[in-house]
Every structure is written in structure tokens, then in C-alpha cells.
Amino acid sequence: MAIGFILAKLAIKYSLFETRNSELFFRTNIWIESLTLFLFLSRFLYRLMTVYMVSKPSTTQDPTMISQNFTRDPLTRIVFFILAIYYIGYYTFLLKKGKELAEGKSRDITI
């Protein structure tokens, strides 16, 4: 969870806001975006490879063991919590900042 908080704080720190034609736009640092995308895609591809390997016919595989392996993978849980904390924290900030800028409370466009 701490890694998710750190990513969210860095994303907040390096976010840029601008208004064009009375519309609000934001952009996150490319390295933070790349890291979150890498975490998601690497774990997704790993799980696809695992499913592919498990789906091969074998006489020694017990179906109950296969389903238990999917739910007990600690790396999947770690990546899930990192991404969940990051997205919850960062998008909560974006909602608050967007509301402030829309109401005109903040005159500063960049953070």
C-alpha cells in the first residue's frame, strides 16, 4: 500500500493542469503513467501465460488445486493493492482539484 501512496503523491506533484476554451485538461508525468501501465500489463500477461500453461491437458492436475492457485498468488495481490491505492488517491485529488478550478477558487493552473 505504501508504494501506491508514493506513486499517487508523485503523480499529484508532477501533474499539470491547463484550461483551453474554458475546458480543464490534466496530464500526469509520463514515467508514472508508464510504470502503472507496466505493472498492469506485466501482471495481466503473466496471468494469461499461467492460464495457458494450466489449460494444457495433464493427467496429474487436480481441478481444485488449479483454482486455489489463482486465488492465492501474492504477487497479484501486491500489484492489485499498488494500483488500487494509486488510482483511488490520484483520482480523488483530480476530482477535488477539478472542482476547485471549476468554481474559480484557485487561480493557479499548474501545481
Image: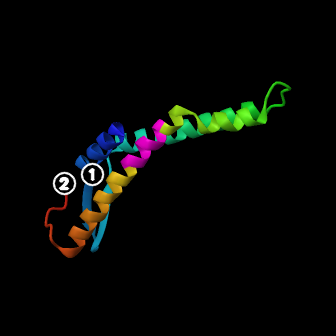
> Where is residue 22 drawn, in percent x and y?
27, 74
Real-space CA distance between mark 2 and mark 1, rounded to the nearest whole angstrom: 7 Å
Check disc 2 and give the amino acid type: Ile
Report the disc number at residue 111: 2
Q: Nearer the viewer, residue 29 or 57?
A: 57
Seen at 39% across and 45% down, the residue is 33
- Which quarter of the rendered picture does the C terminus lie within? bottom left
Quick check: 46 left or right of 25? right
Which corner quadrant of the image does residue 44 belong to? Answer: top right
> Where is residue 86 drawn, in percent x and y?
37, 47
Q: For the residue labelled by badge 1, is the local secondary structure a helix, a strand or a loop?
A: loop
Q: For the residue labelled by badge 2, is the local secondary structure a helix, a strand or a loop?
A: loop
Are discs 2 and 1 less than 8 Å apart at CB? yes
Q: How crowded is mark 1: few (under 14 residues within 10 Å), some or many (20 or more)?
A: some
Report the disc number at residue 15: 1
Seen at 31% across and 46% down, the residue is 8
Seen at 28% across and 58% down, the residue is 93
Q: Is residue 95 above or below residue 102?
A: above
Chief secondary structure of the magenta portion: helix
Q: Is residue 91 above or below residue 11?
A: below
Q: Which of 94 and 14 is in front in this view?
A: 94
Q: Which of 25 and 36 is in front in this view?
A: 36
> Where is residue 40 drawn, in percent x and y?
50, 42
Whether residue 82 appears in magenta in the rendering, the answer is yes
- Segment colored magenta: 78-86
Q: Which of marks 2 and 1 is nearer the N terminus?
A: 1
Which corner quadrant of the image does residue 95 belong to? Answer: bottom left
> Where is residue 69 drawn, in percent x and y?
65, 33
Check disc 1 and give the amino acid type: Ser
Quick check: 31 left or right of 37? left
